[in-house]
Image (cartoon, grey):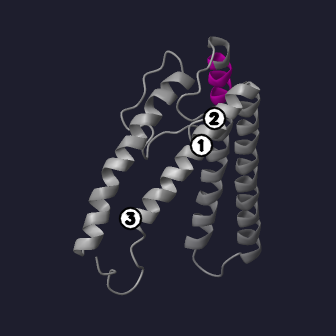
Amino acid sequence: MTSMTAFRLFAFLPVAASVGLLAAPLLAQAHPGQPVAPHAGMHGDHGPGDMPPPFPPGVALTDAQKAQVHTIFKQAHEDMKAQHEKLKALRDKIRTELSAEGDLNRSLLTDLTRQESELHAQEAQARLATQEKLHDVLTPDQRRQANATMEKIRSLHEQLDAIMGHPPEDGPPPAP
């Protein structure tokens, strides 16, 4: 690892940790009565289908809204669990077909991969439906607050990118 890449990594880690610390209270707010995992907000459990937290920090939900969010996530989790089980079964069938001796049943493999693609599309639709339900939980004022916060977060990300840059894919790092 070059010194510039190491610097970028060490400069990025505190920023990533700060973002994780900001997201943890949000998760606690969205799931009342449930403890927040220590890694929530970083690379851990965000929600069904690895969705990001539903609302940015600072959006205060009423108790009724918190209950709605909890119900939405609970249903989405159950739906995604069933989808993942179907995907696992399909992948097992594909693996079995690919490991069979003799000629491959290409038409069966084509059908299985088509089914897998359909399940992925259904998962994407389910995630969008969940996000739409979450959107509808907020009042117009809360949506404006969420949008303003998200714009500030985007601006901070752009500033970080401008300061830190991206490491080159090939070749030596840029001179300091």
Q: Residue at x 68, y 27 (%)?
A: 142
Which range is magenta?
66-75
Q: Secondary structure at mark 2?
A: helix
Mark 3 or mark 1, earlier in chain? 1
Marks 2 and 3 close (CB-CB < 8 Å): no
98 horizontally vs 117: left or right: left
42 horizontally vs 102: left or right: left
Say if 96 sits above or below 122 in the image.
below
Q: Position of residue 54 (x, y in %)?
A: 61, 35
Q: Residue at x 34, y 56 (%)?
A: 12
**Residue under label 3:** 164
Query: Which residue is nearer to you in this view: 163 or 68?
Result: 163
Say if 161 sits above or below 126 in the image.
below
Q: Is residue 73 magenta?
A: yes
**Residue under label 1:** 150
Q: CA distance from mark 2 to mark 1?
A: 6 Å
Q: Give the residue type that dot 3 points to.
A: Met
Quadrant holding the N terminus: bottom left
**Residue under label 2:** 146
Q: Secondary structure at mark 1?
A: helix
Say if 154 sits above or below 65 in the image.
below
Q: Is residue 105 magenta?
A: no
Q: Give the residue type that dot 1 points to.
A: Met
